[in-house]
Image: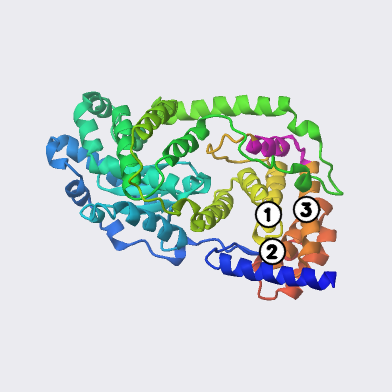
Amino acid sequence: MISKAVNISILLFSLLLICVGNSVAQIGDDYVPIRTKDSKLPNEFFNYSKATISANINGGEELDPLKLDKLSRDIYHFRKEYTEGGNFYLNNELTNYVQGTANELLASMPNEKSNFTFYLSRSMEINAFCMADGTVIINLGLIASLDNESQLAFIMAHELSHYIKKHSVKDMQRTEQVLSYDNTNQGSNKSIFRRLQFSRDSEFDADGFAINLLAATNFDPNEGVTALEKLRAQDTLTDSDPTQILLTKYFETEYCHFDSAWISEEAIDKMNSREKSNRTNLLAQDFGDLLSTHPEIEKRQYALKEIISNFNFEDIEKTDRLERKDFDYIKQVAQFEMVENSMRSSYYTYALYNAVRLLEYHPKNIYLNTTLSKSLYWISYYKEINSGKSEIRQPITTNDKAFFRVKAIIENLDVTAAKKLSYGNAKILSDELPSNELTLFYMALNTEHYLGKNASFTYYNKYLKTYPNGQYVTFVNNRLDQMQ
Ligand SMILES: [Zn+2]
């Protein structure tokens, strides 16, 4: 009787979930990354000449022709660089979501709508940009780090404001030094970036506009303050991961034991101070003091709180927008794409970190588990060929302490331990997912790497037998030929 009652209540509960949850998309047992090559970049992007950009600059006619020409040229080069890097997502659920949010924001200003084009970039930096011609770029890293749609709406409204209020033109008119600086640094990235930045006054102005627009379109203006906090997090060491990441779960196998000294406070501090000076040098090299505008964010937050406290929100019809489940799903997709983009950029430690974070919530996800195995293999591979150094490149996109823990582990592993760890993970995974092509392939690779050629024959041959038309067949055949 008891079990029957339990069964019925489970059934009822499941039905309830289906009813409540049918609008909530979920990422299932696997994840298929979004591919850019499946969709074409719109033609207007390539047909975009400097003359067109110049004609689209809001208030451009107020600038003297020389300055207008420089501004158009900078935007042209910036767009070109972004496009040619294959840096955009096109026509998928993420871009649709961004466009949908933009449409809602622009609903109260129908005349402005046609002035803007929105792009979602693969960049993992928590940021967004607006150019003087109405091109708005939202970074993947931003969506992956925000909590709700109102925060996204705030950042987007802020960017729209830069165009609507002609900030580029006004800032350029004001700043004679920019031109004299550029005369001696023709066409360098540094000068382009410098000129596309907005002044402090323009930033405050844009924040104020954004709060009003949010209120007028039923987003929650209070979320603006938290949205700014997310931007600031890039410059401060934070420990945002509530789970603290169960590192031992992924870095302990029967072949390799987890050594807690790897992530002692001392090890983390040492790494953090080295990272910090690297980062400072990198930024100083590329952008001078420009990116150190982040301390300004505290002032912007203070100013925002002032604006919000003086605002009369009583007339605003509250909607359930903050509860909108869509955003949670979109954020998840963005987080999975962070893993994918880290792998594409060969940021293996960062991929590992992003994957481990998500595994806490999707422990059985095949994509995450295979990525974990892939990134560990390439880390151990590069450690071996670079005599101990694991990483070739790394992004400067996070200041999350949890990332430094993962990085500390990876750095402190010697070559043999790295091979053991990678092998151990591949073995666990291929036992769990015996009929997965990728796990079998990485099992073969890891076996060769850790136990040598003879031991790997079995796995390579098993791969060929199981997946005669598999994606790694050519590679595996070459491997076997070389071993003869
Ligand atoms: Zn701004």
Which quarter of the picture shows residue 336? bottom right
Secondary element at image label 2: helix
- Reading the chain from its start, which is encountered first: label 2 or label 3? 3
Q: Residue 38, relative to residue 211: is it above or below? A: below
Residue 467 within the magenta-colored segment of the rendering:
no
Q: Is residue 83 left or right of residue 125?
A: left
Question: How far apart in space, not on screen, are marks 2 and 3 (Cα)?
Answer: 13 Å
Can I make out residue 14 in this image?
yes
Q: Residue at x 59, y 32 (%)?
A: 238
Q: Amino acid at mark 1?
A: Lys
Q: Would you call the spot at circle 1 few (<14 residues within 10 Å), some (14-19), or many (20 or more)?
A: many
- Reading the chain from its start, which is encountered first: label 3 or label 1? 1
Q: Which residues are magenta?
A: 402-415
Q: Would you call the spot at circle 3 few (<14 residues within 10 Å), some (14-19), or many (20 or more)?
A: many
Q: Position of residue 383 (x, y in %)?
A: 70, 42
Q: Residue at x 27, y 59 (%)?
A: 44
In the foreground, 93 or 220: 220
Q: Would you call the spot at circle 2 few (<14 residues within 10 Å), some (14-19), or many (20 or more)?
A: many
Q: Amino acid at mark 3?
A: Asn
Which quarter of the rendering shows the C terminus? bottom right
Q: Position of residue 384 (x, y in %)?
A: 72, 43
Mark 2, residue position: 438
Mark 1, residue position: 374
Say if mark 3 contacts mark 1, CB within 8 Å: no
